[in-house]
Image: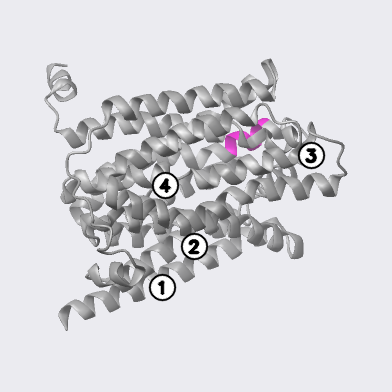
Amino acid sequence: MQTLRTKIFRPREPWEKNLIVLWFSLFANGMAFSEIMPFMSLYIDTLGKFTKNQLNFYSGLIFSITFLVLAVISPLWGKLADRYGRKPMIVRASVGMTIIITSMGFVTNVWQLFALRFIQGIFSGYSSNVNALIATEAPKEKSGMALGTLMAGFTGGNLLGPLVGGFLSSTFNYRVTFMVTGCLLLFEAILTIFFVHETNFHPVEAKKLSSTKQVFKALKNPQMIIGLITTTLIIQAANNSITPIISLYVRELMHHTGDVTMVSGVVAAAPGVATIIAAPMLGRLGDRIGTERILSIGFILAICFFIPTAFVTNIWELGILRFLVGISDATMLPQVQTLLTKNTPNEITSRIFSWNQSFQSLGNVIGPMLGAFVAGYFDYGGVFLSTALLVALNFVLFRINVASTKHAKIS
């Protein structure tokens, strides 16, 4: 007990204090966004009289517009973060999101909601700048642990959010849920303003590294960076290709009986639970044995877990395999961010992380579209097989990228 007390209350370095505060902030951020998404289409349905096709169209449009805008605008925020600091960009995102999400509770028609979701994409960029701040503040040898810890916090909030959102919307109404979400984001902003201190920031001059060409010249391994952000896109697309059909797959396995909604929620949450547990540990392991090795293992595990998921015969098999997929998730995105950190100069870290977020957002759009397309032409099992194929392609591209980068270093 004394040893445990010593570890908990030991003096901490500034980057460790920032990590603790930003873990809680990302937890609040993940919970805030995930608590409104499950009922967004139901909220849209209250804003007018729509046919089924119209409701599907507006739901898809309003869901995707934020990610499309985010993909375009992220590099600008990354450029400003490298010039003025990551903390100002974090505060900018959290305060802006507080106002926008709260305002969603007062809309009277679908186009007002669409406009706010568009603006939400403009003011996004919280998580990418949080990752960039910790990546530049933490020692390189501990970056895997630090970024894995951040992902665990965000994933934990994502898991709890739908439960909180469901409780609030059923106890009160959808509009109250948006207001409570705004309060969560305000709490996140206050934490950042008063308790996060950026101590290792060196601003980039306005004319220096202002163009993409100059940024690439500052990179030792530009091919590695391009390969990594492409890897992020494919990982995100693969993970989200399952989103449109998971509850339908659950309903089929349960033979259209029982509480499909509750079981679907548990199955959907299973990967996140595994990620929360595994991400920090795998980050530490990657710091010891090599981030590239952990990422390669993650690709292989994902392939091994996705393929049998296409052939499950009951809900228990599906739940177990989805939990195992969460472990493979914990080996991938945090490790990509760690490799970006280790291969990027501090002065352009925000720029590179913003590019990575842009590609991640594109994956959020492409993945569900891919899953819906495959499910429409084949069956639900086909989605998991196509996802395994996508991961295998990603693994091959990653190994080619790593091999060519090492060859370039030797030459």
Residue 234: mark in rendering: 2
Q: Earlier in the sequence, mark 2 or mark 3?
A: 2
Kindly indicate whether the residue at mark 4 contacts the one at mark 1 (C-beta within 8 angstroms). Answer: no
Q: Residue at x 40, y 28 (%)?
A: 188
- Image check: 333 left or right of 342? right
Reading the image, the residue beneath label 1 is 397
Q: Nearer the viewer, residue 325 or 117?
A: 117
Residue type at numbered disc 3:
His
Reading the image, the residue beneath label 4 is 327
Callout 2 environment at 10 Å: few (<14), some (14 to 19), or many (20+)? many
Spatial CA span between label 1 and label 3:
40 Å
Spatial CA span between label 1 and label 2:
10 Å
Residue type at numbered disc 2:
Ile
Q: Earlier in the sequence, mark 1 or mark 2?
A: 2
Q: Residue at x 67, y 50 (%)?
A: 244
Callout 4 environment at 10 Å: few (<14), some (14 to 19), or many (20+)? many
Spatial CA span between label 4 and label 2:
17 Å
Q: Earlier in the sequence, mark 3 or mark 4?
A: 3
Kindly indicate whether the residue at mark 2 contacts the one at mark 1 (C-beta within 8 angstroms). Answer: yes
Q: Earlier in the sequence, mark 1 or mark 4?
A: 4
Spatial CA span between label 1 and label 4:
21 Å
State which region is magenta: 262-267
